[in-house]
């Protein structure tokens, strides 16, 4: 009974019309082992059909060869590429909106988080936000917009909203173009990943894919593309070649958000069709310079007391006091107001010599400048 329960937990396998020879064999073996007999041939065939629709998750590798309807080409190897690459070790792969971020890190050395929400809200000619789209169309949007803003400028909200067009002018991460990996060419895909992470379409709706948690994933999986992942490297584990896949479903999926997917299988399309549709942005030019901050506003008037002000760059001085209100301004900034209520001196010459109409640096010094008389004062009053 436990064996049957395991089989009933398998992924739907309706894509593979050739699975019935395998399901026949397993079903007959299970019936014989457990002495199971059905009252009619019709019920037996219904049970067999139900099993065939769910078969696949725990089949051995030699059975996968029979049930995967992809062309077998034999293993292929590229002797010109590194034996292994892992872009996570370069410090470029951190969060889930990675591709432009990683490329920008590789080319410029700066790790900038581009805005996912901007693509969801504003890339609407061909793509459909949360309902899906194509990588190439997203690249085209970034090219035509001359870049994309940062996540800080256009934060992620997790749903499609109205495009904030004013924020499209904040172009921080531009790209120069994009390239498609030739379909079903694993050598070219390997070369592309050796240069940078690559976005690839896969069949992400298969239960085996969705619930993968450890080891090297080898299927079973359809080649009908309905999801995109990021290939962030490749290598081998225990003699089995594999891709390093990063998904966008969070750290609870796979191995903390990653998967090792078998490569060099001999399947033309690759596991889950990963060889069928892959592309990556092209960037050779540096990012545009950060926009200069706006100039600071000019200094405003200086408030002297409750009713009077001095203009910017002037100092409040008292020509006369009326109910503790000063009514004069020295035209110098941060000036020294002389006690006579008529003169002021520069801050560099803080000693007022009103008898000689001089401003002194010290009591006994020859460095002088002419004292500014009261005729230089300007009165500026502002009623509250």
Image (spheres, grey):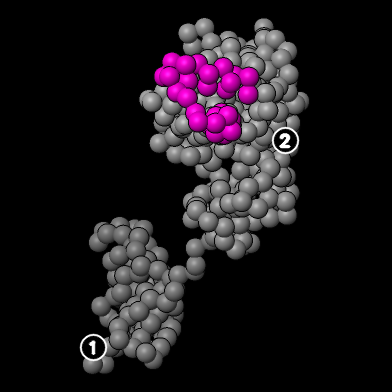
Q: Residue furthest front?
A: 39
Which quarter of the figure is the N terminus placed in? Answer: top left
Q: Residue at x 41, y 23 (%)?
A: 3
- The dominant secondary structure in magenta is helix
Q: Closest to the observer: 121 or 173? A: 121
> Are circles 2 and 1 on residues that touch, CB within 8 Å?
no
Occupied quadrant, residue 67: top right
The kind of secondary structure element at disc 1 is: loop
Residue 374 horizontal side relative to residue 259, left or right: left
How far across and how far down the image is residue 141, in percent? Answer: 70, 48
How far across and how far down the image is residue 150, in percent? Answer: 54, 48
Q: Which residue is drawn at 53% across and 56% down?
A: 159
| Res. 22 in view | yes
Q: What stretch is highlighted in magenta?
A: 20-49
Query: On the image, numbered disc 1 is attached to which residue?
Result: 324
Query: On the image, numbered disc 2 is attached to which residue?
Result: 178
Mark positioned earlier in the residue sequence (2 or 1) = 2
How far across and how far down the image is residue 114, in percent? Answer: 56, 45
Q: Which mark is residue 54?
A: none
């Amino acid at each position: 009974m436990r064996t049957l329960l395991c089989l009933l937990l398998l992924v739907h396998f309706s894509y593979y019309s050739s699975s019935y020879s395998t399901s026949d064999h397993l079903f007959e073996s299970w019936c014989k082992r457990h002495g199971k007999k059905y009252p009619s041939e019709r019920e037996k065939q219904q049970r067999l059909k139900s099993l065939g629709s769910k078969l696949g998750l725990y089949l051995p590798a030699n059975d996968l060869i029979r049930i995967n309807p992809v062309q077998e080409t034999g293993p292929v190897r590229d002797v010109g590429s590194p034996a292994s690459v892992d872009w996570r070790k370069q410090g470029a792969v951190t969060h889930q909106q990675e591709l432009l971020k990683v490329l920008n890190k590789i080319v410029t050395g700066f790790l900038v988080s581009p805005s996912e929400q901007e693509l969801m809200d504003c890339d609407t000619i061909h793509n459909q936000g949360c309902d899906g789209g194509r990588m190439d169309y997203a690249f085209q949007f970034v090219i035509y917009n001359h870049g994309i803003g940062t996540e800080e400028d256009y934060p992620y909200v997790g749903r499609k909203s109205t495009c904030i067009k004013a924020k499209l002018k904040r172009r921080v991460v531009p790209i120069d173009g994009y390239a498609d990996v030739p379909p079903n060419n694993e050598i070219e895909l390997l070369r592309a990943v050796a240069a940078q992470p690559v976005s690839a379409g896969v069949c992400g709706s298969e239960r085996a894919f969705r619930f993968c948690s450890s080891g090297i994933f080898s299927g079973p999986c359809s080649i009908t593309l309905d999801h995109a992942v990021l290939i962030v490297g490749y290598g081998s584990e225990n003699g089995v070649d594999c891709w390093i896949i990063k998904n966008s479903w969070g750290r609870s999926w796979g191995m903390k958000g990653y998967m090792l997917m078998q490569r060099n299988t001999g399947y033309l399309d690759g596991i889950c069709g990963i060889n069928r549709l892959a592309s990556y942005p092209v960037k050779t030019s540096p990012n545009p310079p950060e926009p200069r901050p706006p100039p600071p506003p000019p200094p405003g008037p200086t408030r002297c007391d409750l009713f009077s002000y001095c203009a910017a760059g002037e100092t409040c001085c008292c020509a006369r006091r009326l109910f503790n209100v000063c009514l004069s301004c020295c035209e110098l900034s941060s000036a020294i107001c002389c006690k006579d209520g008529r003169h002021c001196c520069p801050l560099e010459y803080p000693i007022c010599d009103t008898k000689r109409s001089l401003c002194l640096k010290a009591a006994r010094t020859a460095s002088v400048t002419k004292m500014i008389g009261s005729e230089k004062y300007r009165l500026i009053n502002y009623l509250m």
